[in-house]
Every structure is written in structure tokens, then in C-alpha cells.
Image (cartoon, rainbow, N blue to C red):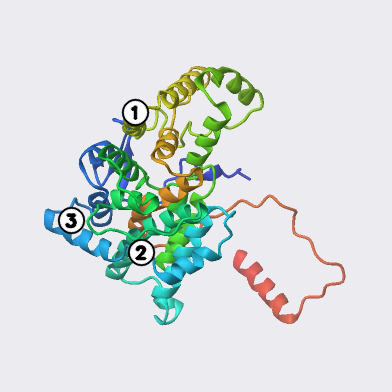
Amino acid sequence: MTEPDIKKGLAGVVVDYTAISKVNPDTNSLLYRGYPVQELAATQPFEAVAYLLWNGELPTEVQLAQLRATERSYRALPADIRAAIDLVPLDAHPMDEVRTAVSLIGARDLAGTGSVLDASGSADENLSRSIRLFAVLPAIVAYGQRRRRGLQPVAPRDDLDYAANLLWMTFGEESGEVVVDAFNRSMILYAEHSFNASTFTGRVIASTLSDLYSSVVGAIGALKGPLHGGANEAVLHIFDEIGSAENVGPWLDQALAEKRKIMGFGHRVYKRGDSRVPTMKAALDELVHHFDRPDVAALYDALESEFVSRKGIYPNLDYPSGPAYNLIGFDTLTFTPLFVAARVTGWTAHIMEQLASNALIRPLSEYDGPAERHIDGYVPDAATLAAAERAEESAG
């Protein structure tokens, strides 16, 4: 019998088409609907990139204004969602708050819509749901950080762009242009990345014709893991462990001797370095200068240089984004929820694409457990015997 070609982790397996994003191997560039992400990050507000992911083209001025008006009308944190967040223990991970909030938003929105047969929704309904989630997630993320600090929520402002408003609701003050621009770029860089683990999870759930909210909740669960979205938190923990640039060598000696996984380096897709890193590193450099923190740059550069020289493995996006979010003032536990606020655009674009040309995602597995065996004294009934006979006839 020929041994099956098992693709552990589905590595290298192409399971479907997508028009949303790809990594161009010739230029090592991540493309959103054909546009290099570094060009989008340098020129576009996040709302325009969200429109692009959902609709396939960048918006006109009128279309962008319409999206902004709709998004800003849904920014406020509803009282029942805040109450649900307050039920989550303060020492739970804030991703649990985000998952709980999105689940309740979905339950409330879908209440009274009928049976599960109606759950998947029309394309227009799902676009509207996507915009509403996009709009309210900043309030959820911001309130999560504020409540852990013992602070009251800050109401959104409809005169601020998406990135500036998220910062406003988190910190209760307007952020400077350098900070807003760096944060906007990070959101764009995190918005989409093809069939990554969380996106694929969302598409699997959507393929059952479940609702968009369930798909997003599943994606949030996948993103929480340290091998995916949680990696940006892990980078800051590493920085905290090391302390300063001069400690990098001894720390790395011990970490490699212990065969520790050094988070923030390496990527399943990129073999010549993550194409998003230069854009995010430039944003980090601007923040370092803005906040006068050369120590952060020194530690960053020392660890990157040492690790690349020893292992030949390059940083991924989480490596510069972790210290950047820290400089902006976000708690380390808030990093992955920020990822959700960005990636919800890519997730929902993929969910809608999946539903537009759906096939249930149901891979096979190769069994390697015990051979068939039976319970002593068990006597099958007539129906079971008949089914077994039919199976044998069919196989014969």
C-alpha cells in the first residue's frame, strides 16, 4: 500500500482561489487586490484599505466619505456589550473580551432571523455586518485596556479617522501626527495575509454556511495563539527579559541552548524576509525618535543582528510592531486585540469570498490508530448486520 503524502499543517497545500491578497514571489511583496501593501501604507487611510479589501478597488472620494459616515455611526460601545465585557475576569486575556463581545454582537444582530438555514446572509447583509464590526472593535479594544487600568470608557469622536479615533478612545487624548501615522500603517500591514491560520479558520466555518459572526469568533480564537497573532506580545516579553542591547548575546546563548522558539522571527510564507517589515521598521524608527528612546532601537537592532547572523532567519511583522505599540502606550496584552481590529477587514473579505463560491471544507486524514477490534460479548442487531452486508457488497 502506498504511503499517503501527508502535508503536516497543510504546508504547501493550495486549497482554493482568492482574489484578495497574495505574496508576489518575484518581488517578495504582499499585494492587496494587486496593490503592494507598502504603497497602501504610505498613501492610504485604513478606511480606504478596508474598502479595497471588501470591494476590490480603492474608493473614490465619494465612496470613502460614505464608508466613513457609516463606520462613524457605529463606533459607540453599546451598553450591553460593555456589560458583557465587564463580566470577563480582569485577569483573563483581553482576547477573551473581544471574542465574547463579537459573539454577543452577532447574537443580538441575528436574533429573530429564523433558523440556521438563514444564517449565512446575503452579500449586502454581510458587507453591512463587516462594516459594523470594523466600526465597533476599536471601542471594544480600547475599553479593554482602560478597564484593566481602572478607567472609564472614552466616547468616540466622529471628526477623527479610524486610527486616530482608536488612539483617542484608548488614551483619552489626541495623539500627534507621527503616532497616528505609525499606527495607521500598522493597521494596514496587519489587515490581510491570505490563507493564514485565523483566516482559514474563518473560511472553514463560513463553508458550513454558518453566519459571519461565528466565522469571526472562530478566527479570533485562532489568532489568540502565540504561533499566530499572539507573537507580537511574545516579542515584548522577550525585550523585557533581555533588558538592554548589551545583554542580547548572553540571553541568546541561553535561549538557543534551551532550544527556545524566538518569537518575531521566521514565517511560513516568506523565505527572504517578511516584506512588511521595512515599512513597520520605518514607523518604529519614527516613534523611537519621537519619544526619544534610542535604547529601544539599540535592543531591536542588536537582537536582529545576532539572530540573523546565527540562524539566518529574518524578522516578521510582529518583531517591529510589538515595540512600536509599546512606545505608543498600549499594554502588551492589548497587542493581539489590535491585530483583531485590523485583520477583521481581511477576515470578513475572505468570509464573503468563501460564501460567493462555496464548497464545504472537509479534508481527509490518514488513520494510524489500532486496527478494528470488538467488545467481548457484543452481538450486533439485525439493522447493523444488514448495513455491514451492504457495505461489503458495495466494496466488492
Residue 333: x and y, percent? 51, 46
Of circles 2 and 3, which is in front?
3
Crowding at dot 3, Cα within 10 Å, few <14 / some 14-19 / many 20+, comes out as: some
The answer to whether residue 268 is seen in the rendering is yes
> Closer to the camera, 294 or 351?
294
| Residue type, label 1 | Asp
**Which residue bears the numbered disc 2?**
355
Residue 245: x and y, percent? 50, 20
Q: Which mark is residue 64?
A: 3
Q: How many marks?
A: 3
Q: Secondary structure at mark 2?
A: helix
- Image quarter hosting the C terminus: bottom right
| Residue type, label 3 | Leu
CA gap between label 2 and label 1 equals 41 Å
**Which residue bears the numbered disc 1?**
285
Crowding at dot 2, Cα within 10 Å, few <14 / some 14-19 / many 20+, comes out as: many
CA gap between label 2 and label 3 equals 25 Å
CA gap between label 3 and label 1 equals 30 Å
The answer to whether residue 19 is seen in the rendering is no
- Residue 181 located left or right of residue 394: left
- Residue 259 located left or right of residue 225: right
Instruction: Answer with mark 2 or mark 3, whichever residue precedes in sequence.
Output: 3
What residue is rendered at 40% in x and 27% in y?
Answer: 293
Residue 308: x and y, percent? 47, 21
Q: Secondary structure at mark 3?
A: helix
What residue is rendered at 28% in x and 41% in y?
Answer: 176
